[in-house]
Amino acid sequence: MNRQEVFDKVAAHLLTQREKSKDSYGCLYRSPDGLKCAIGCLIPDNLYDKAIENSPVDELPENILRFIGVEDSIEDINFLTDLQIIHDDSLSENWREKLINFAEDKGLVWKHG
């Protein structure tokens, strides 16, 4: 996936789910009740491993990053990390505004209504 495709998938997911993926300790790539975070929604079931929970994006296994389609560059890692921060550090009711601003800052096209 290129950055626009990654962004579109994350934005559609978060705006549909409208709820954080978390447990009592904090945000999760995938929660026990089936919710997914901004990066968790990009990880296919066959590559997901519970062992990645509590790992930052830059410590995800290479096969996951390759599947997402990002290079192992600081710019790509920062792009994913910034999307993750929208999920983790913002109220879900503010996601739309945060995602619109993210798209504008990154030169992406907003396609989500």
Image (cartoon, rainbow, N blue to C red):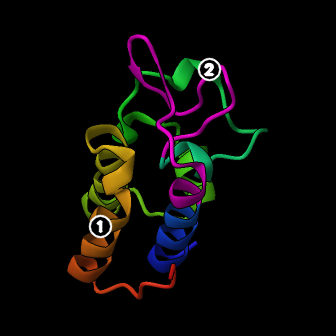
Image: magenta residue range: 13-37
Q: Which residue is mark 2?
A: 50
Residues at marks 2 and 1, CA–CA distance in whole angstroms: 31 Å
Instruction: Give the image location of residue 58, x and y in percent.
Output: 35, 41
Residue lying at the far front of the rendered structure = 93
Q: Disc 1 marks which amino acid?
A: Glu
> SS of the residue at dot 1?
helix
Which badge, 2 or 1, comes first in the chain's sequence?
A: 2
* Front-most of residues 47 and 97: 97
Q: Residue at x 48, y 28 (%)?
A: 28
* Above-or-below relation of 10 to 5: above
Q: Residue at x 52, y 37 (%)?
A: 61
Residue lying at the far left of the rendered structure = 105
Q: Nearer the viewer, mark 2 or mark 1?
A: 1
Q: Residue at x 60, y 57 (%)?
A: 16
Q: Disc 2 marks which amino acid?
A: Lys
Query: Where's the N terminus, which quadrant?
Result: bottom right
In the rendered structure, the answer to whether residue 69 lies left or right of residue 93 reads right
Instruction: Give the image location of residue 50, x and y in percent.
Output: 62, 20
State the image quarter where residue 82 is shown. Answer: bottom left
Is residue 77 something that shows in the picture?
A: no
Residue lying at the far top of the rendered structure = 24
Instruction: Give the image location of residue 95, x and y in percent.
Output: 36, 57
Is residue 46 something that shows in the picture?
A: yes
> SS of the residue at dot 2?
helix
Q: Residue at x 32, y 77 (%)?
A: 103
Q: Residue 97's mark?
A: 1
Instruction: Give the image location of residue 55, x and y in percent.
Output: 40, 26
